[in-house]
Image: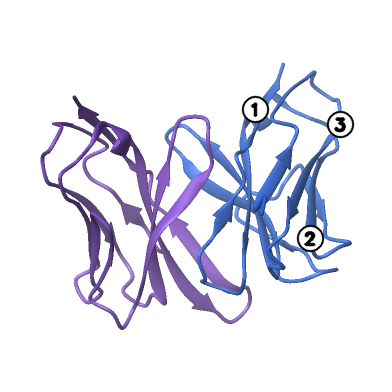
Chain colours: A purple, B blue
Amino acid sequence: KQEVTQIPAALSVPEGENLVLNCSFTDSAIYNLQWFRQDPGKGLTSLLLIQSSQREQTSGRLNASLDKSSGRSTLYIAASQPGDSATYLCAVCALEETSGSRLTFGEGTQLTVNP
Amino acid sequence: NAGVTQTPKFRVLKTGQSMTLLCAQDMNHEYMYWYRQDPGMGLRLIHYSVGEGTTAKGEVPDGYNVSRLKKQNFLLGLESAAPSQTSVYFCASSYRRCSPLHFGNGTRLTVT
């Protein structure tokens, strides 16, 4: 059974710092990996999706990398801002014969960027 | 473009009562999902649908039923609510399997 772990569970940094969030997964037979952001009281917003054949994806100040063989992904946030404060979740998607696909979420890292 | 819309936003039920959570998407997505999110347990899939008229069980389907009579709508029903169903419920949709998920803003349900 796929397990997704995100460490640390919470992170507090000063504004302007570059930071890395970690995501690890136990089964490397994945189709892709997504990073999400969740603001308090809101749903999840998809930030980046990396296909299993890709090494990284970039969107603005965000850069996500994927090392499928070692079961790891990182989300790099450059020049962090207070508006980046949120919970960041990763999820791996695998194809399955019976259900079509299975998405497994990590529990997230709660990020606080202090002014 | 509204994306994924969930109603209601909040609801309080007494044990044994029933209710239906509504989810609507305007992106012409084939796949729709219902998740519940609980502290320490993360997001867990309740039921999902891979197209109009289809439904399937997810990880925690007991106590819930779903229907997808129209492509844009996915309904989640609780026939006899229990305190263990106190949670935040999220609906999500995607164009196809393993494509980016679009989430609604959730329904916070309390069962007393």
Q: Which residue is mark 3?
A: B18
Q: CA distance from mark 1 to mark 2?
A: 26 Å
Classify residue B16 by image quadrant.
top right
Identify which amino acid the numbered label 2 is placed on. Answer: Gln
Q: Quadrant for residue B74, please give it.
A: bottom right
For residue B72, the mark is 2
Foreground pick, A22 / B5: B5
Q: How many marks?
A: 3
Please provide percent x and percent y for residue A85.
Answer: 31, 34
What residue sits 79% from the left and 21% below the top?
A: B15
Front disc: 2 or 3: 2
Disc 2/disc 3 C-alpha distance (Å): 23 Å
Asked which secondary structure carries label 2, the reply is loop
Label 1: chain letter: B
Q: Position of residue A75 (x, y in %)?
A: 24, 56
* Secondary structure under the numbered disc 3 in the rendered image: loop
Image quarter of the C terminus of chain B: top right
Q: Please name whichever residue, B45 or A88, is drawn nearer the observer in this view of the structure.
A: A88
Residue type of the residue flagged with mark 3: Ser
Q: Of the residues tagged 1 and 2, which is closer to the observer?
A: 2
